[in-house]
Amino acid sequence: MALARIPALDPQHPSDVAAFIAGIAGTVVRPEDAAYDEARQVHLAQIDRRPAMIVQAANAGDVARTVMFARETGLELAVRGGSHSLAGHSTSEGGIVLDLGAMKGLHIDPERRLAWAQPGLRAEEYTVAAAAHGLATPFGDTGSVGIAGLTLGGGIGWLARKHGLAIDALVSVEIVTADGRLITANETEHPDLFWAVRGGGGNFGVVTRFQYKLYPVSGILGGALFMPATKAVLQALEPIAASAPEELTTISFLMAAPPAPFIPAEVHFQPTLAIMFVYDGDPESGAAALAPFREVATPLAELVMPMPYPGIYEMLRDAEQRAPATHRSLFLSTLDDAAIDEILARHAAPSSPMAMTQIRILGGAMARVDASATAFAHRDAGVMVTLITPFMDPAEAPVHTAWTHSYFEALRPNATGVYSNFLEDEGDARIREAYPTETFRRLAEVKRRYDPSNLFHMNQNIAPATEA
């Protein structure tokens, strides 16, 4: 449906700004307000921008009104869900931040196994509510990430091998487009737009409600095996994880062992490959799926237990704290010896003691979806490697950025693409690596139809196609 347009407004004219604010059901935070400094923060601590206003939307009407205000005034529009954008796209210097964080409505229909969710929800909030019914939707690997940005980019998480990506569970969206319309997109209504939002990010509008499938997921076997950080262990990781039952999804981290109480003191801060996992099935079968890892080497420590599915988020709670960090990511067809040697060599002399290399072994349900079915097209990628370098002193950022980028460039010759959600602000060439040529062409054409002026450009931006 079409929502009421607002008249052309001048952001420099106090009465026009006041008229806009008066029409917002939620809250508008401006630089002079006491809540401003907290409201403008995003998850990545080195991003420090000062928007002209932060609109904390209460409903789809607020979203549409803000979109039209940005369009009429020419102010830059940044859309924020969970604020985890690695590229800093959830904030703006001198523009408008449309903050969806207060829009947390959730309706679960356990009989039909469907959920209707607003975009301010975070993965853990949704997952805990669904788990009360023994159900889940596949989201990402950390609970504080917003479901909106995660879903629009694809959504690779703990259930990827059994149930696929978040977009594979997506049934429908309600979305405010650049002309202020609130429309529904699904397989039959605006199917081109529905195809595009499943992997094309926030380029096409602001989603105000998602409809998802729910899958039976109750108790899991979850936790981590802390393995020796050796070449033999890394060589075994992909063949074991890729051939395991699809109930097993692993996300591994080469890093310094944390000083956790279940890890022997002599192992603290020593290199380890932490193989974190979710086995969505009975614990005995899960233990059998883990047995091949134990045959390669004896774990230095382990934490393996049956738990409710949301319990896996607890294990990464400390890693979710707001801090500065730099990242690079890529897909590989396989984790070959050259990549393993490079990974081990880099971790022998990291720039930061907190540096880690995340390795996800993919396949399973996410790979069985045709590459052309959604805008996320890297269905055949076997491995995703992400370099994560947190640090404490912002003044040292150039050192850690240089180390991370050099490491990435050494791995890059064998890359087969990149996951758009794990891109920083890396330029157009890297955005194109996220999409095969035909996928990118289709996305640009959908962008031309729904956002020809590129109002929604604070994202991994795909410019509108030009008229033939």
Image (tube, grey):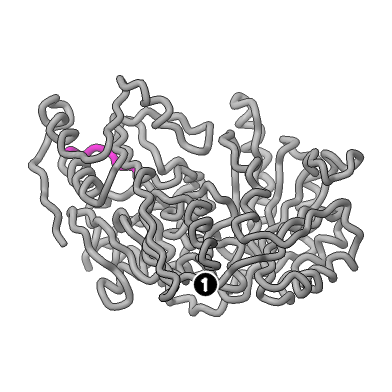
Q: Residue 207: x, y in percent?
A: 32, 56
For image coordinates 25% across by 62% down, the residue present is 448
Q: Residues within 10 Å of mark 1 (few under 14, many from 20)?
A: some
Q: Residue 441: x, y in percent?
A: 36, 68
Image quarter hosting the C terminus: bottom left
Q: Residue 229: x, y in percent?
A: 84, 52
Residue 20 lies in quadrant? top left
For image coordinates 18% across by 54% down, the residue present is 179
Residue 217 lies in quadrant? bottom right
Q: Nearer the viewer, residue 190 or 94?
A: 190
Q: Amino acid at mark 1?
A: Tyr
Q: Is residue 126 left or right of residue 5?
A: right
Compared to residue 191, the image places residue 151 above or below, namely above
Secondary structure, mark 1, is strand
For image coordinates 29% across by 62% down, the residue present is 174
Q: Is residue 287 left or right of residue 164?
A: right
Task: State the residue position of label 1.
Answer: 215
Compared to residue 193, the image places residue 271 above or below, namely above
Asked if residue 440 can be seen in this view, the reply is no
Asked if residue 241 can be seen in this view, the reply is yes
Q: Nearer the viewer, residue 261 or 185?
A: 261
Image quarter hosting the N terminus: bottom left
Specify whether residue 77 is painted magenta. yes
Q: Is residue 67 left or right of residue 275?
A: left
For image coordinates 62% across by 52% down, the residue present is 313
Residue range (magenta): 73-78
